[in-house]
Image: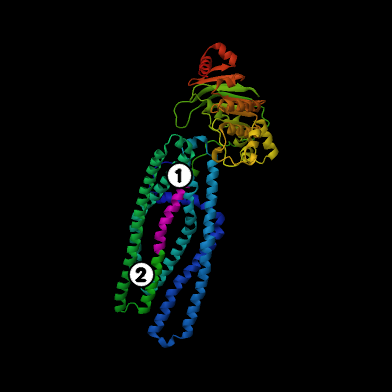
Amino acid sequence: MQQTAKSRTAGENLRLFKRFLPYFRPRLPVLLLDLFCASLTTICDLVLPLIVRYITNMGATNLAGLSIATVVRLSALYVVLRIVDTAANYFMQSVGHVMGTHIETDMRRDLFAHLQELPHAYYSNTKIGQLMSRITSDLFDITEFAHHFPEELFITSIKVVVAFVILCGMNIPLTLIIFASLPLMVVCSNHFAKPMQKSFKDSRHQLGEINARVEDSLAGIRVVKSFANEDVEKAKFAEDNHAFLGVKKRMYHNMAGFHSVTRMFDGIMYILVVCIGAIFMIKGRIGAADLVAYLLYVTTLLASVRRLVEFTENFQRGITGIERFVEVMEVPASIHDLPGARDLTQVRGELEFDDVSFAYEDGDTDVLSHIHLHVKPGESVALVGPSGSGKTTLCNLIPRFYEARSGVIRIDGTDIREYTLHSLRKQIGMVQQDVYLFSGTVLSNIEYGKPGASREEIMQAAKLAGAHDFIMELEKGYDTYVGEHGVKLSGGQKQRISIARVFLKNPPILVLDEATSALDNESEHLVQQSLEGLMKGRTTFTIAHRLTTIRGANTILVLTDEGIVEQGSHAELMAKKGVYYNLYRMYQENE
């Protein structure tokens, strides 16, 4: 995701275009109609020089044979063609662009769906701002690319081929001279096209960095203000903003060189036609009417070639957007349903870790090593130990947020990998220390635990979580807007809403990840009461910071860098006077 942009080869462009083609297939009828309209607009440009040539030739050689009626008929024909051209152009500009928008929408849909499937590890190493850039601004240019690329290629191909045939009919040597200079124009333009391509990708990457910086700073704006570090954030943003300025400068210098070269060759080709054509006319090798028509055709030809060459800019923008789209789409969803996976239903709640080990993809050392654990249905297990000992990681293996490196985790005697991810995670409820509430109402945030739940079900879940009373005291009750990330609520209120969400989900397996460690004593007491109600009848894993909250657990696991070093009830572990005993005594002294 963070690699430095480099120039793509023709083969890489072809591969990216092949990845893009499936999005064209559903729109093929519209595309063909768009190309048909493009051919109609091309007719007008090709017919006008022929009309001018005919009238000029008749005027020079047989003026008596040129009647007013003939001129009117030719003019009427051209007006009809212009009407057809107007209608065709309207279709191209409206329906053609809508086709491009549909393709962009489909790509954004697939990209967002793929992002939903990627594992936790991917998000640990990727900036959200970069992903926002890819799912929004990167795909904007694809609308223009999807519409104009086939259109411009088709129109230019017709004009170049037809113009070549007609011009050869007028004067073969002059035509060959003109067309021989076209490859030189393309080669010189390509000298600027490659660095322009690189600068487009650099620009996209740096825009993603700015998005990431803004997202990070504004999400933490309360921390920024509490430390009076507004100037620090301004300085960091200025650094990214200045880097973006530098990239844009390089991009526009390359664009200027690219467009200047095409303009220079336009002038050269025009003067070639005028100079060589005049010499040929003096020597009687081309007539005046043919030279006038020749100039008009060269004008049409150069305009088409220039449009195609200049479209290279849009092409590079579009193909860069496709490249960044493909980069994300080709990130494998490393955790997925295995063939033949079945739904997990009627869960009793028996859990077993059988010789389970785990290491992160970018780490060489196991975070968990040879874990053996058996939990009976409805039992509560508490995990304690120093930070970094793998408590949260162990719990995250149960819903397969991460995949065990070796060993087997079983629910009710069956390997969890034999179940579909969706059904597995439906049976597990999680209450975390860092509560995330979505921007919306209290009602919608609780409903997230069971989409489509009735208002009565939501209110009952809130009552079970001890949240109903404070919710009713809010300005609009359950319809109160909580603000982004729930900023309008206190920590204890947010936590009880998250517990209500799990009550509504009603899972047989529960994971409590330091759910009360960030709360004050009064809020902790209220939330702890809610949690005790939630834990009844469920198999529960509790990661505890405050050890007094886990004394009633059936089993307490003490994790260190060496794995599970102690296991037993509170009384049993205190009697051993080992690691847990020392941790508990230390906690009591600090209280």
Q: Nearer the viewer, mark 1 or mark 2?
A: 1
Above or below residue 294? Residue 393 is: above
Please name the residue that numbered disc 2 is placed on.
Answer: 175
Would you say residue 314 sits in the magenta stretch? yes
Main SS category, magenta section: helix
Percent x, y for residue 85? 50, 69
Residue 78, x across and y down, in percent: 48, 75
**Where residue 182 appears, x then y in whole percent?**
35, 63
Amino acid type, mark 1: Asn
Residue 351's quadrant in the figure?
A: top right
Q: Which residues are drawn in magenta? A: 305-325
Specify the amino acid type for callout 2.
Thr
Q: Secondary structure at mark 1?
A: helix
Q: Is residue 115 left or right of residue 168?
A: right
Cα–Cα gap, marks 1 and 2 = 52 Å
- Callout 2: helix, strand or loop? helix
- Give the residue drawn at x 49%, y 26%: 367
Residue labelled with disc 1: 211
Closer to the camera in the image, 215 or 486: 486
Residue occupying the point 48% across, 79% down = 74
Is 554 situated left or right of 233 in this image?
A: right
